[in-house]
């Protein structure tokens, strides 16, 4: 290596420094771990998908606290990749708005510079941020029902983007929300979707004003009950509007402050306009909708939690009755039935006074006792020892003994649709326990049974007998009917107990057709459907009660036949 000369040494010392040939960074990269930092209000933006769109009810209290004490709980912040501004990560938009107000009012530096905890933007940043804001708002101020519903609808869209655009079921949406730290039941999601789809366009003021979940659920049940009634009755009419438009028009008339919102007024107006358009009787239509509402609430309502400290309510004792035939005179009577202990039966209603709850409990217990006794035809002779042995054997075999009391209060587990849907074959509601009402129901069941054989037109209502009669034009026409139709019509004619006209309906042949109709002996071509069989059972139950009432031999208890 050649020795450096003084000139070479001077040239090296005078040479310019290293030059950077790459691009110059406009800003520093964000930290890759949680990092405390101080940001100014100019650098910080609220979260743009914040589910809260109304003013926090505790806004003034929070503002007063921050003015006096400063920001005790600085919000966590983050930043989307490529954006210049930081955003609130999970909860804190209200505090940010207050800081901006205080800075504008006071110009104090402590409101302008905020010490925050920066958290890196995660891989699933949007959905993590949204669920974080939902959870934080629930803890700090409580969202309105519609705000929560809109937030969950936004979450649904984000999840579906993650899922490649594939739609999510309500149960899958509930599962994903729970996994991301915001648990919501599937039944609540269903109500929220109904609120966004059907209620928000009509009553935004009421919803954003704080209409609660229970009122929203009652509105949803009312809409479905009215829609079912409309679909059944609109078949023979051509209404000028469809039900969706009618519902929106009626509901929008009541978009006022939540304090002045009345669900009963909405129902009265809706039923009134439906009755006018469908040319139906208001009272009949209203009763039909009320029955449907009750059944719908029973199907969709959540079972209340059992209170461990709640006392057991015993059913009122049933009046003594003669023992059934075949029972020995000395047979022990069944012990008094114990009703299942539920919060509804013994605890005050949420939000009501203590005295109101005490007054309500005996009423509910009385209703449960009435329903329980309404399913007892004759007491089953049993003893506590026998029940203990049965439970022991069932435990050993892994079986589950049927609980009569619970099943009776829940209703007989069968469900059949129609104009008067059936969820309980045996029990007769107090509002139905009158001859004229019973005849209306019996005639409708007869028409629906006959409809299976396309002979519903041969059933006519009657104000006498059990509520209906069978008519045919001529003997020849009756004989020309298909075997199934003729057998079905003959069965109904025999049940009507009306004088047999010369119509070709030979009741004597019913003995040959009865087995094929009821259980399909010889083939299923003439067998009634399961739904028709349930309606036949209900028809018979109502007819027995009707005849008891008119003979004067009925007891005051509709659950017992004479």
Image: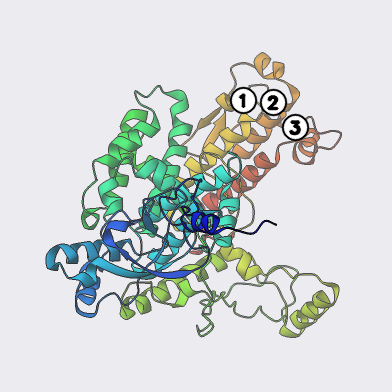
Dot 2: few (<14), some (14–19), or many (≥20) neighbours within 10 Å?
many
**Of labels 3 and 2, the one closer to you:** 2
Q: Label 1 vs label 2: CA separation? A: 7 Å
Q: Residue at x 32, y 46 (%)?
A: 267
* Of labels 3 and 1, the one closer to you: 1
Q: Secondary structure at mark 1?
A: loop
Label 1 or label 2, whichever comes before in sequence order: 1
By what rule are the colours in the image chosen? rainbow
**Residue 453 coordinates in the image, percent (x, y):** 66, 27
Q: Is residue 97 left or right of residue 242?
A: left
Residue 343 in view here: yes
Q: Which mark is first along the chain, 2 or 3?
A: 2
- Horizontally, residue 179 falls left or right of residue 200, namely right
- Asked if the residues shown at circle 1 and circle 2 are in contact, with their CB atoms under 8 angstroms apart, the answer is yes
> What is the spatial separation of the Cα atoms under label 3 and label 1, in whole angstroms?
20 Å
Say which residue label 2 marks. 485
């Amino acid at each position: 290596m050649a020795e450096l000369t003084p000139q070479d040494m001077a040239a090296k010392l005078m040479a310019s420094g290293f030059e950077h040939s790459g691009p110059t960074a406009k800003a520093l990269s964000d930290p890759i771990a949680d990092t405390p930092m101080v940001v100014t209000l100019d650098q910080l933006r609220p979260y743009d998908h914040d589910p809260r769109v109304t003013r926090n009810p505790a806004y003034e209290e929070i503002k007063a606290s921050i003015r006096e004490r400063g920001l005790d709980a600085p919000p966590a912040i983050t930043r989307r990749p490529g954006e210049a501004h930081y955003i609130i990560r999970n909860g804190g938009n209200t505090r940010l708005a207050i800081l901006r107000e205080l800075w504008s009012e006071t110009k104090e530096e402590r409101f302008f510079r905020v010490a925050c905890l920066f958290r890196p933007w995660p891989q699933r940043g949007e959905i993590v941020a949204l669920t974080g804001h939902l959870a934080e708002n629930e803890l700090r101020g409580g969202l309105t029902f519609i705000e929560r519903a809109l937030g969950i609808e936004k979450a649904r869209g984000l999840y579906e983007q993650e899922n490649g655009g594939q739609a999510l079921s309500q149960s899958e949406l509930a599962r994903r929300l729970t996994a991301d730290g915001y648990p919501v039941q599937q039944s609540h999601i269903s109500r929220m979707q109904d609120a966004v789809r059907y209620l928000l366009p009509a009553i935004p003021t009421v919803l954003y004003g704080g209409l609660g979940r229970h009122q929203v659920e009652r509105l949803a049940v009312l809409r479905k009950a009215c829609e079912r009634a409309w679909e059944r009755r609109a078949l023979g009419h051509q209404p000028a509007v469809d039900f969706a438009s009618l519902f929106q028009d009626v509901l929008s008339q009541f978009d006022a402050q939540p304090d002045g919102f009345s669900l009963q007024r909405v129902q009265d107006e809706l039923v009134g306009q439906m009755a006018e358009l469908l040319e139906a009787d208001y009272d009949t239509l209203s009763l039909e909708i009320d029955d449907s509402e009750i059944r719908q609430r029973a199907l969709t309502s959540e079972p209340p939690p059992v209170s461990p400290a709640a006392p057991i309510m015993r059913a009122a004792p049933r009046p003594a009755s003669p023992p059934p035939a075949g029972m020995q005179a000395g047979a022990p009577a069944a012990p008094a039935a114990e009703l299942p202990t539920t919060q509804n039966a013994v605890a005050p209603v949420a939000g009501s006074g203590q005295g109101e709850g005490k007054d309500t409990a005996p009423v509910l217990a009385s209703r449960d006792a009435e329903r329980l006794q309404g399913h007892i035809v004759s007491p089953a002779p049993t003893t506590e020892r026998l029940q203990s042995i049965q439970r022991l054997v069932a435990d050993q075999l892994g079986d589950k003994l049927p609980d009569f009391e619970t099943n009776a209060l829940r209703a007989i587990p069968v469900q059949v649709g129609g104009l008067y849907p059936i969820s309980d074959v045996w029990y007769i509601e107090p509002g139905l326990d009158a001859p004229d009402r019973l005849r209306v129901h019996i005639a409708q069941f007869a028409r629906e049974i006959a409809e299976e054989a396309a002979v519903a037109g041969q059933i006519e209502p009657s104000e006498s007998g059990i509520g209906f009669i069978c008519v045919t034009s001529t003997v020849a026409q009756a004989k020309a009917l298909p075997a199934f139709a003729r057998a079905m019509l003959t069965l109904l004619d025999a049940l009507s107990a009306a004088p047999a006209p010369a119509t070709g309906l030979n009741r004597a042949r019913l003995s040959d057709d009865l087995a094929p109709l009821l259980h399909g002996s010889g083939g299923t071509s003439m067998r009634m459907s399961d739904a028709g069989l349930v309606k036949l059972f209900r028809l018979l139950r109502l007819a027995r009660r009707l005849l008891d009432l008119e003979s004067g031999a009925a007891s005051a208890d509709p659950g017992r036949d004479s």
